[in-house]
Image (tube, grey):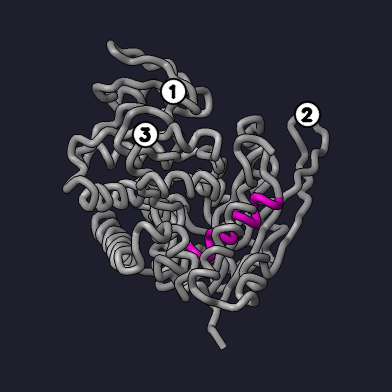
Amino acid sequence: MSLRGTTFLESVLQTLKRAIELGGYPQEVYEILSRPQRIITVNIPVKMDNGKIQVFTGYRVQHNNALGPYKGGIRFHPEVTLEEDIALATVMTFKNALNGLPYGGGKGAVAVDPKKLSKRELEELSRGYARALAPFIGPETDIPAPDVGTDPQIMAWMVDEYSKIAGRNVPGVFTAKPVVLWGNPVREYSTGFGVAVWAREAAKKLWGGIEGKTVAIQGFGNVGYWGAYWLEKMGAKVVAVTDSKGGIYNPNGLKLADVKAVKDKTGTVMNYDSPGTRKITNDEVLELPVDILVPAALENVIHKGNANNIKAKLIVEGANGPTTADAEKVLHSKGVWILPDLAANAGGVVMSYLEWVENLQWYFWDEEETRNKLERILLDTFNRVMIRWSKLGMDKVTIRELHMWRPWIGYTMP
């Protein structure tokens, strides 16, 4: 076994098992929630620009719909696996339940590197995936959204394809659409905004406020960038960011607007240069001497091989599953607060819920009103979690375990 230890799915199931034991629930609960209700595998033929046909394999995992329609993103990435998709769908069940959303958990994926496709090829693949899943999704059945490698444009193609099949306009079947196609401007930054809100509230508990606290962020995509943007606006000092190629660190703080401009122009933050700034790797960013660490890239980056080297007092999970179960035990024993993905990166799905409500009623809120609604839901969840965590004993259970054994999970005890 590698230093990273257990796989993402194994970590999720370990935590689920531990949570059920803490709650005193029967083994049947684990049997129900440890496996998805349905797994859909599709093969999508795409005519490439060279005239040849290439077949792409995709999945949609529908984990549990006890609380409402399945809800979760679609990932386009060359290294996706069915096991990973099952883990992500399982996490979505608990994330939606924790935040009081009338959704179950789902997740989708296609094994592809979208950066290697032309725009036409990407559109054909996106539409093909929507066609293949059309019998299994819908605004009251399963409502996908973007994830790694997908974006509002891809959602636009997919909702258009589904609407063609349905014979009517059905905007509520996908969320995080472009604003002109019944989306909402808050959705672009909602996940990063949620990360920042949870970090801010936890910092108040730990230090009395977030002002001046240093932050390192692994991942400078949508979640990482907007998390950094809102954290800076809230008074924190972002000192390190990385993307897939590597990153930069300046203990005196980074000028995020300049870093973003370099990233947009050259494709990587590593080309940013300023006095006092040095290049770092994606492993190094996790071990910097900072107050707050935001892993906002991929899963299992914090593992038993590096957990003891983590110096941050507060970890806010912007990515899905960045901390393995083994690492979480180590960090919890050291008194590190880990705000898990189930809560900390839920801003995206909460905003998707608000967009879905808009679509169903054909009534729309402006950006400020929407952001206020989003923040109220996030704050309500944070406060409920903190009250419950304090009562149970912060030294006895992790926040993740707390989330997963609460009876919001959609299973009624006999």
The residue positioned 49% from the left and 65% from the top of the image is: 404
Amino acid type assigned to the residue bearing label 3 in the image = Lys
Q: Is residue 183 magenta?
A: no
* Residue 367: percent from left, percent from top: 28, 54
Per the rendered image, the range of residues in magenta is 82-94
The residue positioned 50% from the left and 27% from the top of the image is: 283
Task: Judge whether 45 appears above or below 130 on screen.
Answer: above
Q: In which quarter of the image is the N terminus?
A: top right
The residue tagged with tag 2: helix, strand or loop?
loop
Q: Which residue is nearer to you in this view: 113 or 395? A: 395
Mark 1 and mark 3 in contact? Answer it, CB < 8 Å: no
Label 2 Cα neighbours within 10 Å, binned few <14 / some 14-19 / many ≥20: few
The residue tagged with tag 1: helix, strand or loop?
strand
The residue positioned 28% from the left and 64% from the top of the image is: 383
Q: Earlier in the sequence, mark 1 or mark 3?
A: 1
Q: Earlier in the sequence, mark 2 or mark 1?
A: 2
Amino acid type assigned to the residue bearing label 1 in the image = Gly
Label 3 Cα neighbours within 10 Å, binned few <14 / some 14-19 / many ≥20: some
* Residue 150: percent from left, percent from top: 55, 44
Amino acid type assigned to the residue bearing label 2 in the image = Asn
Q: How far apart are marks 2 and 1 (CA)?
A: 36 Å
* Residue 93: percent from left, percent from top: 53, 65
Residue 50: assigned label: 2
Query: Is residue 348 among what the camera can see?
Result: yes
Q: Quadrant of the C terminus?
A: bottom right
Q: Does the magenta stretch include residue 86?
A: yes
Relative placement, left or right, of 81 versus 243 is: right
Write down the residue under mark 3: 311
Q: Is the magenta stretch mostly helix, strand or loop?
A: helix
Write down the residue under mark 1: 247
Q: Which of marks 3 and 2 is nearer the N terminus?
A: 2
